Image (cartoon, rainbow, N blue to C red):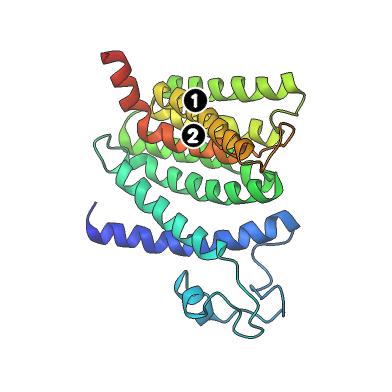
């Protein structure tokens, strides 16, 4: 990508991240993400436009409300920075050797939703339907656009990817009767699987494996540090999303290395 394209994607990503902060705060409360205007949760004063510039406003305000000086969590600029980085990263990947530019619009939607889901699931142990279910029609539209732009229609591979993710995650949910896996994970799994399958079945397989590896490592660290016990429930949605990102980037190269070994 050109520097102009990188800067544009990064800037738009920061703005989307600012909106995602609203989603992350309001969706678990069941309130509208459109109205009313954003306000300080401590003093209720509406946030001024100049105090709503991604990252910069938080830095200039030194992480505090202009009116009541209550602290503004560092999560807010982190979400904005993460979204900007994800947008740039996805743009770089889509315009790289694999030439998946047609898939980029859908990946940007899925990546942005994924950031909101990671934070919400980590904090509330929920993957809200209001975010997950719209990804189904959005995914159909996004993959159809990718096919029209790229001239490739790997529908069979996409279906296999969705089937693998649904069978494994849904199977664990059924066997554990919901104790080892939440139903929100089951609903999210086909969306991630079908997207990775569109890239290649190897991406779907590597991504699913990476999710369990990441979850296992994180759980082991918590156990060894004494921050969790054997009965502690971990939100698995973040690991599904992280695994999907790993599969997207490393799936095909890992498959080539394995087959060539």
Give percent across and percent down for residue 252: 34, 26
Q: Residue furthest bottom?
A: 67
In which quadrant of the rendered view does residue 224 lie? top right
Residue drawn at 46 percent across, 29 percent down: 207
Quickly name the residue at label 2.
243
| Residue drawn at x 58%, y 51% as measured from the top left | 116
Mark 1 vs 2, N-terminal side: 1
Question: Is residue 25 left or right of 13 when viewed as pictured?
Answer: right
Q: Position of residue 194 (x, y in %)?
A: 50, 29
Dot 1 lies on which element? Answer: helix
Q: For the image shown, how many numbered marks are present on the structure?
A: 2
SS at circle 2: helix
The residue labelled by disc 1 is: 209
Where residue 126 sits in the image (x, y, percent)?
70, 44
Residue at the front extreme of this rendering: 225
Name the one closer to the observer, 184 or 143.
184
Q: Residue at x 72, y 54 (%)?
A: 28
Q: Residue at x 34, y 21 (%)?
A: 255
139, above or below 45, in the image: above
Residue lying at the far right in this picture: please name it.
Answer: 177
* Residue 115 spot, x, y in % from top left: 53, 50
């Amino acid at each position: 990508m050109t520097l102009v394209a990188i800067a544009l994607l990064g800037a738009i990503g920061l703005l989307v991240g600012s909106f995602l902060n609203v989603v992350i705060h309001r969706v678990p409360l069941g309130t509208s993400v459109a109205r009313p205007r954003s306000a300080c949760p401590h003093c209720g004063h509406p946030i001024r436009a100049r105090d709503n510039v991604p990252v910069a406003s938080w830095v200039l305000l030194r992480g505090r409300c202009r009116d009541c000086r209550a602290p503004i969590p560092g999560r807010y600029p982190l979400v904005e920075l993460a979204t900007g980085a994800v947008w740039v990263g996805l743009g770089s990947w889509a315009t790289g050797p694999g030439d998946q530019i047609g898939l980029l619009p859908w990946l940007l939607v899925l990546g942005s939703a994924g950031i909101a889901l990671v934070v919400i699931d980590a904090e509330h142990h929920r993957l809200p339907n209001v975010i997950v279910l719209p990804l189904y029609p959005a995914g159909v539209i996004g993959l159809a656009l990718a096919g029209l732009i790229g001239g490739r229609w790997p529908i069979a591979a996409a279906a296999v990817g969705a089937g693998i993710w649904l069978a494994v995650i849904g199977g664990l949910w059924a066997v554990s009767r919901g104790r080892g896996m939440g139903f929100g994970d089951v609903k999210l799994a086909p969306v991630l699987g079908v997207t990775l399958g569109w890239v290649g079945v190897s991406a779907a397989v590597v991504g699913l494996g990476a999710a369990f590896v990441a979850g296992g490592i994180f759980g082991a660290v918590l156990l060894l540090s004494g921050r969790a016990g054997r009965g502690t429930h971990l939100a698995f949605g973040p690991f599904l999303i992280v695994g999907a990102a790993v599969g997207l980037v490393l799936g095909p190269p890992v498959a080539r290395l394995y087959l060539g070994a």
